[in-house]
Amino acid sequence: MIILGVNEGHNAGAALMVDGRLLAAISEDRPTRQTTRSGFPFQAIDECLALAGVAKRNIDRVALASTQLPPKYFWVPRESFSIRDFWREQNDYWKPRLYEGKHPSFLDVFRDRLDPSRFIYDPSLVHGEEDHAGMLTARLQHHQHYFGLPPERITVHDHHTCHAWYAFMVHPQRLEHDLLVFTADGAGDGVNGTVWSAARGQPLRELHRTNQCNIGRIYRYVTLLLGMKQFEHAFKTMGLAPYANPKYGREAYDVFAETLQNDGLGFSYRIKPKDHFFHFKEKLEGMRFDGIAWGIQKRTEELLSQWVGHGIRKTGIGHVAFSGGVAMNIKANKVVWERDDVQSLFVPPGSGDESLAIGAACKETVDHAMVPAETITACRPMTSPYLGPEFDAAAIERRLHRLGGLEGCSVRTVDHHHVANLLASGQVVGRFAGRAEFGQRALGNRSILADPRPREVVRTINEMIKQRDFWMPFASSVLAERLPDYVVNPKHLAADFMTLAFDSTPTGQRDMFGALHPYDLTSRPHVVHRHANPDYHALISAFAAITGVGAVLNTSFNLHGEPIVHTPEDAVSTFLRSGLDHLLLGDLLVSKPAKP
Ligand SMILES: [Fe+2]
């Protein structure tokens, strides 16, 4: 059975599942080059079908994620919003509604951001900017026409059901343990937190859902109050938090702690704020920016830890999985896995809305398989995160010939030893090889690599390569066999997707200081197994043979604010617009002329 999963909301994307196996998953922001792109994912769908060799007419079923997508966000896509636009949304749209009894229209407030060309559905079916039901009708009709399928072959799945079933179905030990699954995000289909459980090998059962799990909502508004984009930059607040003096952070923490409380499987308020932006804006006025980051991070960690603890006490299950946008908070994940009662924690790659298409396809597979649910849940759909496009040597050469701007650059075929030597001598290399990894974290195939040892590597890459924020840490790719040398992992957690943080060992602090958080010295490793990515494993092994260090610094291959590179053309464009001296395309090394 061929099932296509589709997410048209925030971080839109597509996923193709054939007979219970996930063959391709792509976020629309990669081919469109628009970070967090929303809307019907034309290009991601085409690329998924091409990768699997499936024609559109052969799709058996289409699974949509989210029942409630407001029409206003299709007319005014918020991925184009600046930080000032997000503030304008608060001041000119929400404040009059919440505090002045007025009802301004979103489309009026953002007349200058209207983009009717992005609304590809039948407008006659949608009556107003908040008409969720009309929007759903329009989406279903569009899918019927686009795929030539009858209505009964198209299903819409609840947002958090998609988050939960994604984490559950791709869990590497689902057949060995009972599982407890949590989802948390800003909001999806009117809900922002759910709790589920599954007996070993059995389907997932929902235990609780709530719209009071406002952890993600508060976190994103605090990110906006700190002058950063509320959706994309929450991880910057997390990266800033460790620098604060807790003495100042406590003051901010108290502001958060007097509001939202964990209450068993759900949440309640000690003091209920009228809203989650202006309330905190007023209360946090005059406090230090880093202290605010510390306070919200600390409170987030506490609330999630307490929530998971209550779930474990209620179910007796200590193997936990977590997905939804809040699961991207790797430092909170660390506090959760360090709990004594947590036996394991699994966070899948791309756990935000970019994986909703996979979750929808997973649920659809279970719902419509012609075998009992117990049997279908026995299959593990995702065996690799490398689910995007690949370009072979001939395709890369062809494309390079067509590109301008490379005059003066040298192009030659090299082996791993050559690249490892470049890295060991302090050079920074952009690597574009193999199938693109799914999710927002680069897992080696669309990565910028460097020697992880020197402290100054952070500044070099920040200034010359990515114009990144100075306080943000870099991550690492670590050979699986060397992981115990570098991080403290007493529960032997799988860390294959850069979704968990660990304390570093003294050896880790010596060998990969440049790839740790410079202040708290934690690590967010991407563990590289030979079987998962043989070519990348061989490259890091070559680096280890020269330096003795079984890890490289790994950061995503993109310029600041842009999506990760998707095609050889994107890689070359990024190479030319940055201070990168070397670009590895498969085994072709493109190098700029040596500087005088
Ligand atoms: Fe979500």
Image: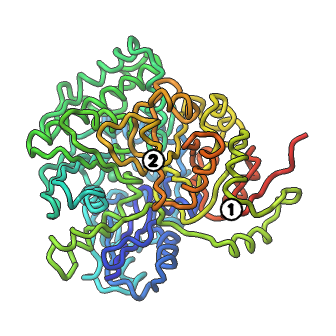
Q: Position of residue 540 (x, y in %)?
A: 58, 50
Q: Residue 582: x, y in percent?
A: 74, 51
The amino acid type, in three-letter code, at marker 2 is Glu
**Nearer-the-camera pick, 299 or 227:** 299
**Looking at the figure, which quarter contains the N terminus?**
bottom left
Q: Residue tagged by mark 2?
A: 481
Please state which of the two labelled residues, at mark 1 or mark 2, is closer to the viewer.
2
- Disc 2 residue crowd, few under 14, some 14–19, many 20+, Cα 10 Å: few
Side (left or right) of 197 relative to 464? left
Mark 1 falls on what kind of element?
strand
Beta carbon of the mark 2 residue lies under 8 A of ligand 1: no
Q: Amino acid at mark 1?
A: Leu
Q: Residues within 10 Å of mark 1 (few under 14, many from 20)?
A: many
Please give the name of the residue rendered at 75% of the width and 44% of the height, measured from the top-left corner: 579
Q: CA distance from mark 1 to mark 2?
A: 27 Å
Identify the residue position indicated by label 1 in the image. Answer: 585
Residue at the spot x=28%, y=82% of the render?
A: 153
